């Protein structure tokens, strides 16, 4: 089934997604916001109030710009892009390149002119070659994904404009867990970047095998014996699913398109893997947040409390958010992660730059330490546990997540779904969190007081 590129579907065919589900919104005139505060926007009513005030990284930066505390620098070649990345602390090494047509500026995207995507733990930035606007998805601790456009032409007062209606049309969907979010898709692309007819598309997350990833994306790096869908287009109309799988282990894209207009010539495979993990992690955090707040609100309404917290939440309502909290826990610990079959190596320096961010425990270990031989990370807990969005999970869901995580890491829950976790790795992840996460509940603190002072050498980095 051919897909017509839709408004904000960055994350649609590639991450945003064919890019990164970061596609921002559509307009008849490129770079102009067609809709901001008109029409129906999901979750715009209480208790979520999605259209209300936000405190995401872009909103904070805009307040600094408004107050004259900082400015954005414009460059003839890349516009405001480099300055935006610097201000939002988004590394250039995170660049990934998607050539499927999944942004509102889709007419400018093709295998010859891919869209560049950049990200950190809280922000995704999309830049179309010769485009009219920089597209941004920024995560607010309570409201999840918030969508912005920054017009590319040089301006006296550059403005991040919040976009709602057109963006949520695509970014509140099954692939985002039906909350404002982001997603990555892998497709069978044609020579123009559209999805080949009668071919499937894959939403990418922890459980996606490498063989189903990166369709519609350029990928630099090596994967050994493993194949993927990147760096290829469908040439056989009768069998469009028959991609040339020889486009792996590519470290130089210059023979495929002109890389000179981009900040780097890389579309790093390790950045791709991390990006895919965290998009669905973000969505699950937002989903758990929303469903808990909605259940508490409904319980309060039923109790006649006019929005005040109820004395207890009925089981029928609690079951709604506990189910999502359990799903969040499973994803947080990579329970369904598709294993790697060979070593993966990037090209842009992202691996080293990402891992260096820490934080690290007393033995020098971090949840950002990579494995890249049999799985993505060395220790089985996502680094996104340190984000403001995770910290903002409402009670009682947050306590549930912490309790279940504690059960899994201390070995109390040794059920089959977690049987692949080595005891030493669970213990190491537990100790890392005890040293680096400072809001842990009482059962964690009690365990910490009774743990041995030394850690076995077998669980230290490099062993």
Image: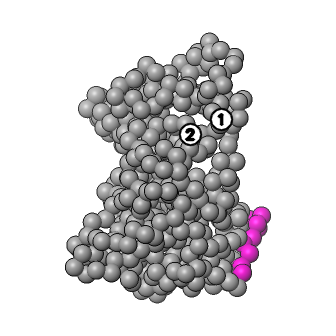
Residue 220 lies within the magenta run: no
At 48% from the left edge and 44% from the top edge, which residue is drawn?
Answer: 374
Q: Quadrant of the C terminus?
A: top right
At 71% from the left edge and 64% from the top edge, which residue is drawn?
Answer: 86
Please name whichever residue, 462 or 69, is drawn nearer the observer in this view of the structure: 462
In this view, the residue farthest toward the right is 69
Segment colored magenta: 66-75
In this view, the residue farthest toward the front is 225
Secondary structure beneath dot 1 equals loop
- Disc 1: which residue: 461
Structural crowding at the residue carrying mark 1, measured as other residues with C-alpha within 10 Å and reported as few (<14), some (14–19) or many (≥20):
few
How many numbered discs sit on the rendered protein?
2
Residue 378, disc: 2
Measuring from the top left, give residue 397's x and y in whole percent. Answer: 43, 33
Main secondary structure of the magenta stretch: loop
Q: Are marks 2 and 1 in contact (CB under 8 Å)?
A: yes
């Amino acid at each position: 089934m051919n897909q017509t590129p839709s408004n904000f579907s960055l994350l649609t065919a590639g991450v945003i997604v064919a890019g990164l589900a970061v596609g921002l919104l559509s307009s008849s005139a490129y770079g102009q916001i067609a809709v901001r505060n008109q029409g129906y926007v999901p979750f715009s009513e209480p208790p979520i109030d999605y259209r209300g005030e936000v405190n995401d990284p872009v909103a904070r930066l805009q307040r600094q710009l408004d107050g004259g505390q900082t400015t954005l620098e414009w460059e003839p070649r890349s516009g405001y892009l480099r300055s935006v990345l610097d201000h939002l602390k988004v590394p250039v090494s995170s660049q990934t390149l998607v050539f499927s047509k999944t942004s509102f500026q889709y007419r400018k995207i093709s295998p010859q002119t891919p869209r560049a995507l950049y990200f950190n733990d809280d922000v995704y930035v999309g830049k179309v070659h010769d485009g009219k606007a920089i597209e941004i998805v920024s995560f607010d601790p309570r409201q999840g994904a918030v969508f912005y456009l920054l017009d590319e032409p040089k301006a006296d007062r550059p403005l991040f404009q919040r976009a709602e209606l057109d963006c949520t049309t695509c970014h509140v969907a099954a692939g985002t867990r039906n909350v404002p979010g982001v997603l990555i898709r892998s497709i069978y692309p044609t020579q123009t970047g559209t999805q080949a007819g009668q071919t499937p598309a894959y939403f990418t997350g922890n459980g996606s095998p490498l063989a189903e990833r990166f369709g519609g994306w350029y990928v630099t790096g090596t994967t050994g014996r493993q194949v993927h869908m990147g760096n290829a287009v469908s040439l056989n109309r009768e069998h469009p699913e028959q991609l040339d799988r020889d486009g792996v282990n590519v470290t130089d894209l210059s023979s495929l398109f002109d890389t000179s207009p981009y900040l780097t010539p890389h579309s790093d495979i390790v950045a791709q893997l991390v990006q895919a993990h965290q998009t669905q992690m973000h969505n699950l955090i937002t989903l758990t947040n929303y469903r808990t707040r909605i259940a508490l609100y409904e319980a309060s309404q039923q109790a006649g409390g006019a929005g005040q917290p109820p004395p207890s939440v009925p089981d029928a309502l609690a079951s709604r958010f506990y189910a999502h909290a359990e799903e969040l826990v499973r994803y947080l610990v990579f329970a369904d992660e598709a294993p790697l079959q060979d070593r993966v190596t990037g090209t842009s320096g992202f691996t080293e730059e990402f891992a260096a961010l820490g934080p690290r425990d007393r033995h020098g270990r971090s949840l950002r330490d990579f494995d890249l031989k049999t799985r993505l990370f060395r220790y089985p807990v996502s680094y996104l546990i340190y984000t403001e969005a995770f910290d903002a999970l409402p009670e009682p869901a947050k306590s549930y997540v912490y309790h279940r995580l504690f059960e899994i890491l201390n070995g109390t829950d040794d059920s089959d779904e977690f049987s692949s976790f080595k005891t030493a790795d669970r213990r190491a992840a537990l100790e890392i969190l005890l040293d680096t996460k400072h809001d842990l509940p009482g059962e964690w603190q009690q365990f910490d007081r009774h743990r041995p002072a030394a850690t076995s050498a077998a669980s230290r980095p490099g062993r």
